[in-house]
Amino acid sequence: MDARALSNGTVWLSIPTATDIDAITECCQHPSIGEWVTIPVPYTRDNAQTFVDDIVRPGWAGRSPTWALRLHEGGSVVGMIGLGERDESSAEIGFWLAPSERSRGLMTQAVNLVCDYAFRPTGLALQRVSWRAFVGNYPSAAVARRAGFHYEGMARRGSLQRGRRRDHWLAARLPSDPPGPALDWPAEFDHALQRAPEPR
């Protein structure tokens, strides 16, 4: 699959490369990223190198693209977003954002860009993009909800993070879903939507 940059004029998504390794390493030092993302902790420069070499490059060679989120074309990495192939017509989305750039709507825009590409016949032509996050990660849930993902439940001990099983929430978006925020989330997320910064 050819690397495809995406932008709406506010956020720029492009393939992470070796020149981004130091910025990725710096971003992943923040405890709020390690708390909710399945990355090594502590996170080293070697981990970032392995990410670029063993995840990003093979992912683009297949159907699991990863983009670096930048604030201008060619800018430094401030976040990461990607699709992990589940089968020939579905993928799971994942993302993180540097704390300094949260609460600006950047990740919601990035998720919408990636989903538009995922569903586009000239993109990946997917029929489903799923999302999951560890229970308690309300900022990530707020992004998913704003981006039109419909809540599907909670999986008890459904995910593994550094050897520990954790509960996770589930949601998904289909190409037929109407644009805009999803309104079918449980009431516990209503308050979180108002206060949640973007995302962890």
Image: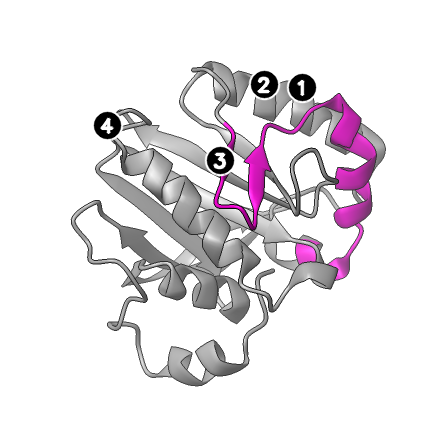
Is the residue 149 above or below the residue 51 in the image?
below
In contact (CB < 8 Å): disc 4 and disc 3: no
Do we see residue 10 in this rendering? yes
Question: In the rendered structure, which segment of residues is drawn in magenta?
Answer: 5-33
Disc 1 packing (10 Å; few <14; some 14–19; many ≥20): some
Q: Between disc 1 and disc 4, whose residue precedes?
A: 1
Residue 136, compared with residue 94, is above or below; it is: below
What residue does disc 1 label? 53
Q: Disc 3 designates what residue? A: 6
Of all residues, the one furthest to the front in this rendering is 9
Q: Closer to the observer: label 1 or label 4? A: 4
Q: Position of residue 148 (x, y in %)?
A: 31, 59
For the N terminus, the image quarter is top left
Alpha carbons under labels 3 and 1: distance apart: 21 Å
Frontmost of labels 4 and 2 is 4
Three-letter amino acid code of the residue under disc 2: Arg
CA gap, disc 4 and disc 3: 16 Å
Residue that numbered label 2 is attached to = 57
SS at circle 4: loop
Judging by the rendered image, the residue that carries numbered circle 4 is 121
Res 70 → quadrant:
top right
Label 3 vs label 2: CA separation? 17 Å
